[in-house]
Image (spheres, helix red, strand yellow):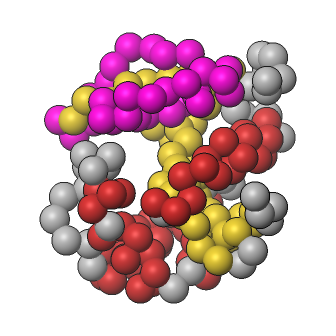
């Protein structure tokens, strides 16, 4: 097994074409109910600008994730009401990197005194949720966003260390 060298980079430093191709992958779309229609370069530029604006407003946001310098996905933190929600969108070849990336992102959140817990919103198509349980997240009530149902999990940052 090859050792991974995960880096967090600015989302805006990733080529628009790479991000658009990632978001256009049917594998990705299958688990993103809010993703409808074809994903264009213009949509990518708008999304990246919105994610950069979140950094400017809240001091925390989304990154591009790299493994040995190669793009493997994006994700990060966003305010959802009173919650800090963590989202992760990996390429199909990088699915096994999710736990490592999430742990590192939670470590970053733990350094922010405003954040006492992080939520994760998963579509019902994501039936395997054991990884979140192993990270210490517990399932809460389902939520509806833009008329789509999501499973809501919460990880308190002051609770036990990762197993």
- In the foreground, 32 or 148: 32
Residue occupying image coordinates x 79% and y 36%: 110
| Residue 107 seen in the figure | yes
Residue occupying image coordinates x 33% and y 57%: 27
Q: Please say whether residue 15 is one of the residues in the magenta stretch.
A: no
| Residue 58 seen in the figure | no
Q: Total label count?
A: 0
Q: Please say whether residue 121 is one of the residues in the magenta stretch.
A: yes
Give the left or right position of residue 131, taking residue 100 as reference.
Answer: left
Residue occupying image coordinates x 33% and y 83%: 41
Give the left or right position of residue 149, taking residue 117 as reference.
Answer: left
Q: Which region of the structure is painted magenta?
A: 119-147
Counting from the top left corner in percent of width and height, residue 104 is at: 76, 47
- In the foreground, 25 or 155: 25
Q: Give the answer, above or below, for where 107 lies relative to 56.
A: above
Quarter in which the N terminus is drawn: bottom right
**Residue positioned most to the front:** 1
Q: Quarter of the image holding residue 118?
A: top right
Q: Give the answer, above or below, for where 42 lies relative to 132.
A: below
- In the foreground, 2 or 51: 2
Counting from the top left corner in percent of width and height, residue 141 is at: 38, 14
Counting from the top left corner in percent of width and height, residue 157 is at: 74, 25
Give the left or right position of residue 155, taking residue 5 as reference.
Answer: left
Q: Quarter of the image holding residue 119?
A: top right
Quarter in which the C terminus is drawn: top right
Give the left or right position of residue 53, taking residue 136 as reference.
Answer: left
Residue occupying image coordinates x 51% and y 58%: 90
Q: Give the answer, above or below, for where 132 lies relative to 20.
A: above
């Amino acid at each position: 097994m090859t050792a991974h060298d995960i880096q967090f980079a600015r989302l805006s430093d990733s080529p628009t074409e790479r991000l658009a191709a990632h978001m256009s992958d049917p594998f990705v779309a299958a688990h993103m109910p809010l993703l409808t229609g074809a994903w264009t370069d213009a949509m990518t530029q708008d999304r990246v600008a919105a994610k950069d604006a979140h950094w400017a407003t809240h001091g925390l946001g989304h990154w591009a994730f790299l493994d040995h310098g190669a793009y493997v996905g994006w994700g990060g933190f966003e305010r959802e009401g009173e919650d800090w929600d963590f989202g992760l969108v990996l390429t199909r070849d990088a699915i096994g990197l999710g736990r490592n990336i999430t742990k590192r992102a939670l470590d970053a959140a733990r350094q922010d005194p405003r954040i006492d817990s992080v939520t994760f919103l998963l579509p019902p198509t994501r039936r395997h949720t054991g990884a979140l349980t192993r990270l210490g997240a517990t399932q809460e009530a389902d939520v509806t966003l833009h008329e789509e149902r999501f499973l809501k999990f919460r990880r308190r940052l002051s609770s036990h260390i990762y197993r």
